[in-house]
Amino acid sequence: MGEAGKARLRPILMTTFAAITALSPLALGIGAGAAMQKPLAIAVIGGLVFSMVFTLLMAPVIYATLLGRP
């Protein structure tokens, strides 16, 4: 992992986990009016997880592959 990856790992993880934690009550249907917003919360959480995996794993691998570096 390069210097940029090491520098950005913690902020990306912290932001993602903070957002997932904040959306968890809606995704679980806890609270007034949560039933209506539950699908949105689940979709946002799924998008956050996918983007985190893509940003931290897939993008560097694709970049290294295109440059021909190990």
Image: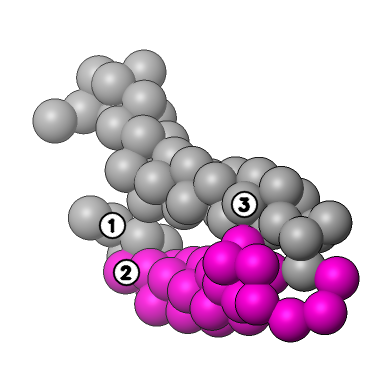
Contact, CB < 8 Å: mark 1 with mark 2? yes
Judging from the image, what secondary structure is the residue with disc 1 in? Answer: loop
Name the front one of labels 3 and 2.
Answer: 3
Earlier sequence position, callout 3 versus callout 2: 2
The amino acid on which the numbered mark 2 sits, given as a three-letter code, is: Lys
- The residue that mark 2 highlights is 6
Q: Where is residue 47 in the image (x, y as percent from the top left)?
A: 60, 45
Quadrant in which the C terminus appears: top left
The quarter of the image holding the N terminus is bottom left
The residue labelled by disc 1 is 2
Numbered range of the magenta stretch: 6-33
Categorize mark 1 by other alpha carbons within 10 Å: few (<14), some (14-19), many (20+): few
Residue that carries the numbered disc 3 in the rendered image: 42
Amino acid on which disc 1 is placed:
Gly
Mark 3 belongs to which amino acid?
A: Ile
Residue 14 painted magenta:
yes
Main SS, magenta region, reads helix
Could you give the CA–CA distance between mark 1 and mark 2, rounded to whole angstroms? 6 Å
